[in-house]
Image (tube, helix red, strand yellow):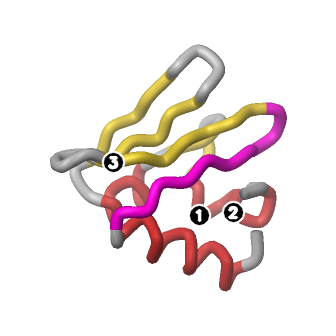
Amino acid sequence: MTKDQFKEFQNGIQIGEEYNFNYGNNEYWISQDEERFYITKVKGSVTQEFSTATQLFEEGKVDGRFISDIYEDIEW
């Protein structure tokens, strides 16, 4: 995804959108409920939980790397 698409991706999550994406050979979901935000690796159902969307993007990792460091390699 491009830098502009990444900003759109972040903004969408801030306003309640949920997305799935692929990185490497794995599929991931970013979802939320009334209290938390989640990144889930579909294979194995490994989930990380966060209090805010900002925390998700600051601390959430995909294959051990921060999303902001790999967004160019994410397919959505």
Q: Which residue is mark 2?
A: 71
Quarter of the image for residue 48 reads: top left
Q: Check the image and report above or below for 52 versus 33.
A: below
Q: Mark 2, mark 3: which one is toward the viewer?
A: 3
Q: Of 57 and 17, which appears nearest the observer?
A: 17
- Who's the residue at 35% across and 63% down the image? 16
Q: Position of residue 42 (x, y in %)?
A: 60, 27
SS for callout 2: helix
SS for callout 3: strand
Q: Which residue is mark 1?
A: 68
- Segment colored magenta: 16-25
Label 2 Cα crowd, 10 Å radius (few <14 / some 14-19 / many 20+): some
Check if mark 2's residue and mark 1's residue have beta carbons within 8 Å.
Answer: yes
- The numbered disc on residue 20 is none
- Give the amino acid type for the residue marked by disc 2 in the picture: Tyr
Q: Position of residue 70 (x, y in %)?
A: 70, 57
Q: Which residue is mark 3?
A: 32
- Who's the residue at 65% across and 61% down the image? 69
Asked if the magenta segment contains residue 55, the reply would be no
